[in-house]
Amino acid sequence: MSGRLAGKVAVVTGAANGIAKGCAEIFAREGATVIGIDREDCDLTDEAEVNALFARIGTDHGRIDVLVNAAAFAHFAWIENLTYTQWKETLTGELDIVFLATRAAWPWLKASGKGSVINFASANARHALEGSPALAHCAGKGGVLALTRQLAMEGAPHNIRANTIAPGFIKTAATARHLEMDPGFEQAVLAKNMVKRLGEPEDIAWCAVWLASDEARYVTGADIAVDAGATAW
C-alpha cells in the first residue's frame, strides 16, 4: 500500500460490519492508526458513554485526525405502518449518533490541525426512490446532509473538513438478506446503475481514504455519490 494515511489517527464507528469494516481495513492498510467502534464497545446513543469513550481515545493519542461516522440503523415502513417509536429510533440511529460522536470528537479534531469528518448520506437524502418504504430513512439522511454542511462551516476556522459520501447499493451481510427476500431487487438496482454491478465495501472505502487524506485538503461541504451512476440520470 502507498501509506496515504500514514501517521493519522482515525476513529471508525460501526467497524464490525459492512462499509465501516471496509473503511477500517483499508485505512489500516494505508497506514492509519484505526480505532474501530461497534455496539459491543459503546452505545453510540448514550451521551455520557460516547463522551467518555472519545475522551479516552483523545487522551491516549493526543488528537483525532479522522472521524468516520459509519454506524447507523433504521426502520423501513410505509407511513401508515410506521410507528412513532420506529420513527424516533431511526432518527436516533441515523442522525443523533452522528451528532453525539462528532461533538465528542470535536476538541480532538481541533487538536489535529487538519481534521476530517466523513459522514454517510444517501440518494434518499436528495430524492425519493419509487417503491421504497424509506420515510424515516430519508429524513435521517437528509438531516445528515444538512448537518455536515453546517459542520464544514463551523470546522473551517479550525482546519476541520466535513463531507458526506452517498453510497449506491453495496453488498453487505445486511443487504444480502434483502436480496434473498426479494430476488428481483438486484435486477432493479442494476437496471438503474450505469455500471452494471453491485458495489463492494471497498468501493466506498477508497473514497473515504481520499477524503481522509491530505489529498482532499481543499474539499469540504461536499456530498460525493459513489453509486455506479445511479443518480446521474
Image (cartoon, rainbow, N blue to C red):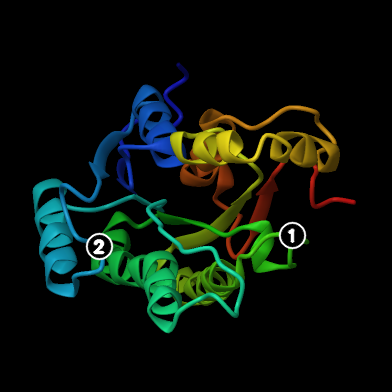
Which amino acid, by three-letter code, is at mark 1? Gly
- Left or right: 67 as drawn, with respect to 107: right
Pointer 2: what residue? 44
SS class, disc 2: loop
| Quadrant in which the N terminus appears | top left
Instruction: Give coordinates of residue 124: x percent, y percent.
Output: 66, 63
- Evaluate whether residue 5 shows in this view: no
- Dot 1 falls on a residue whose secondary structure is loop
Residue at numbered disc 1: 131
Nearest to the observer: residue 53 or residue 160: 53
Please name the amino acid that badge 2 sits on. Leu
Q: Residue at x 38, y 35 (%)?
A: 21
Which residue is depicted at the point 43% across and 37% down?
18
Q: Earlier in the sequence, mark 1 or mark 2?
A: 2
- The residue sitting at 37% across, 53% down in the picture is 71
Q: Is residue 53 visible?
A: yes
Front-lying residue, 17 or 211: 17
